[in-house]
Image (tube, coloured by chain):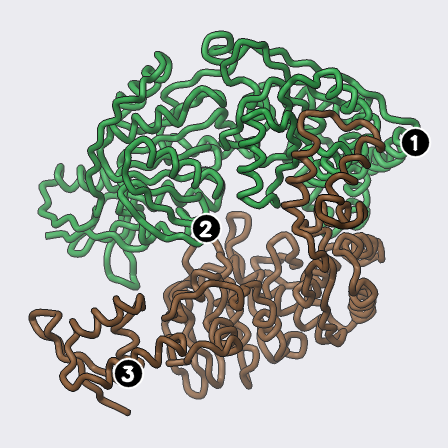
Chain colours: A brown, B green
Amino acid sequence: MTLPVDLLRFRRRKGIVIPLYADETKLSLAKTLISVFKDNLGKKYRDLKDSLDSCENLGYNYKLVRGLRFVLEKRCILGSKISLNPVEIRRAIFERVGNRVITSKKMRQEIFSKVSSKFGVDSLEIEDALYADLSEEQRILEFTSPEPMELLKEYNFALITGILTQSYQMELIFKGMVERPSLKLGESIVFSEGDFKKIILKMYSTKYSKSRISELEKVIAQLVLQDDWRIKAEIRQSSRNYFLEVSKEKHGRLLNSKKCYQVSQETPKLPLREKQLPDVIIVEELATSQGITEAIVRELLRRRGDFADLGNIFVSKSKLDLIIKILERQEKLTLRTVLEAFKKMKCQHPIQVLEALGYSIEWAENRGESKVYRIKR
Amino acid sequence: MIELSFKDGSIIAEGGDIIYGKYDYHLGVFRAPAFRYKEVIENLQKRGVNYIDKVSEVSEFHKRINELELWDYQKEALEAWKNASRRGVIVLPTGAGKTMIALKAIEDAGTSTLIIVPTLVLVEQWKERLEKTFKERVGIVGGGKDNVEVLTVTTYDSASLRARELGNKFNLLIFDEVHHLPAPTFKKIGEEYIALYRLGLSATVKREDGFHLLLPELVGDIVYEMHVEDLTGTHLANYTIETIYVPLKRVEREQYEKHYNAYQRFIRKRGIKMKSAKDFQRLIMRSGLDPEARRALLSRNKAMEIALNSEAKISYLKNLILENSEEKTIIFTQYNSMVYRISRDMLIPAITHQTPHEEREDILQKFSSGEYRRIVTSKVLEEGVDVPDASLAVILSGTGSSRSFIQRLGRVLRKKEKKAKLIELVSVGTIETRLSKRRKQD
């Protein structure tokens, strides 16, 4: 999770950025906000928003209140219980109105009665459905409540990653194992210095897309779970360079939360269940196009149950059976026969599928004549 | 021998230095910003240095368009751009046919072209227009699509994010609503693409933050400029602007005074002078750490909300619409909440950023055919979107931005026999009267 720039809280002193962490003194605020979310479970998001707005008058800095709210909102699932389609309702209402000017309640009621009889429901249901698809009209269907201290830790994590989105170069020093950052973030070099490892990451100056933010979160989440770690970052703010240092020794107790990254993973908005997906999915491609991490894509595809996990790619189980049959049926396979078979099945990425199934290609000058043979079972 | 290539939005020189080049210690090469491509080549030639150029991957595009006839002022604008080495900005009011000039510019340049627009709706609109004109497949990058063709449309966001890959594939960049380009996150588009030809289009390039001063370097100078008054009556409809001052209701007035006075007291107490947008920005910054400043700012916002969304205005609006029931009307408000309130109350179709694409198209199509006579919207229809012509625009609330005002006015100016009308409702004796004056100043 990463706070948006307008909610970041920090001070700048003598070229140093000092994040304003939420520590134990903010536990009472955390408890209050959590209870507001619990109280509004089942209610409209608009009502939750109104209650939260009034929490800004509790005497705390409004950016802190909004930041904690931002973290808690990620734990909510919004939805609507209305079975009517709001777009259809609106169309029916506006078409019924046509060119008339509605100036009285009576005229308005007449329109609603006619439309409600068309849909065979009560006028009130039509009224409820009219703009039920707007975010403010959605209801809080689920809320996963954190412990207050856990909330503060998640907030601090989101604060740090938020500040780091303004970094142009950072050093990650750690004992243990952190994956090398993806190229989406920038160019990185990895060193070993005794027991410690160091990653120097030179960030690209491009805008932070969802997938870039997700990559940054992934790296920092791994880092703060290590036995010992430190971040040294150079930050560009208001056309000046500043320095940020965060370490396990000084800030670990405020940051080290196993849930920091899991929360991000639990809230993808990708309805893979409903989506029309191709039969062959390259995990990295789908993650990039949807702006989520590869881990989330894997998890969601596994949950669907109709895809086979072949490592970096997933293949629909029905097509995989066919592919295996075709590959096993022929003794002397050439690339041409494989490509033609894939084309017939409307499957993409044949080479990657072959490799994932343990086949190798002996490339010939004429590409189609290349031999395909199995190297592992 | 110097070998030039394109990498990550820069021109890389191996084997020697180049003009505008900085030494990259990681790669051991010289790097120059992509938009200096022409100068780099010219300088190498001038110095007599041997070089291999592997930078450009642009392609040619030669297609004539016969059916498109430009008006005289459009021809002048196009000529002015061509004479400025196909670089520069054309400023024309909404409805004056900037897109047609752009299509002719593509025909004239005869090269791969990237059209950069602010929203996904405009991406679709441009794609459709280009396909219809050139009968050619048009690529889209952005909004989940990633298909690069010789003519490609993209958003400012995607053009910025993908500059590393796309930066050397186009020789003409067309910036629709070019006033977005100098924004800190987008100006790199101007810097990381090698395109020699660049065309910027806008109804007004001036930005409150002053960044429009970067446009000459990123795109070129303003090569042609015409305003609403230059084309009114000939190519744009005659129009009138009427400001109606509506008094607040008693309870609203009391609430307004309470909040606005609280804000004023704070300003006086701290001796703050509010002379420009920058002073206000400073107050916002201060409110992050100063609770009293925060309370004052909230009071001001509350007062503003009362003035902009007054009940009195809504009552007046109903009468206004009744009196003009035959007019095709667009109602503009500052806040989406007000859009939906009017839509619910008067059962007028609403368009905001939350409106699904198909529903928006359906509403606009019905508005065009006359099936719907009124729509209510906030800011989404201000910029670029092809909105069927209306004869009456009602500004229920707005900011002090002259750009926004010009764009809203443009929505009623497409040439027609009848005189177009723009009516703004302003809460008298409030902060809104100043906003109304400010937006009409430029």
Quick one: SS at disc 1? helix
For the view shown, which residue lies furthest in the bottom direction?
A: A377
Q: Which mark is residue B251?
A: 1
Q: Amino acid at mark 1?
A: Val
Which residue corresponds to the image point at 71% horizontal and 63% vertical from the top-left? A68
Q: Residues within 10 Å of mark 2 (few under 14, many from 20)?
A: some
Q: CA distance from mark 2 to mark 3?
A: 38 Å
| Residue marked by disc 2 | B143
Q: Amino acid at mark 2?
A: Gly
Judge by depth and name the residue closer to the eye, A207 or A82. A82
Looking at the image, do the residues carrying marks 2 and 1 touch, with CB atoms under 8 Å apart? no
Q: Which mark is residue A360?
A: none
Looking at the image, do the residues carrying marks 2 and 3 touch, with CB atoms under 8 Å apart? no
Numbered marks: total: 3
Q: Quadrant of residue A282?
A: bottom left
Quick one: SS at disc 2? loop
Judge by depth and name the residue closer to the eye, A357 or A58. A357
Protein chain holding label 2: B
Q: Is residue B369 left or right of residue A102?
A: left
Q: Which mark is residue A325?
A: 3
Between tags 3 and 1, which lies in front? 3
Q: Quadrant of residue B344?
A: top right
Q: Specify whether residue A234 is in view.
A: no
Q: Is residue A308 left or right of residue A354?
A: right
Protein chain holding label 3: A
For the view shown, which residue lies furthest in the left direction?
A: A365
Say whether mark 3 and mark 2 are on the same chain.
Answer: no
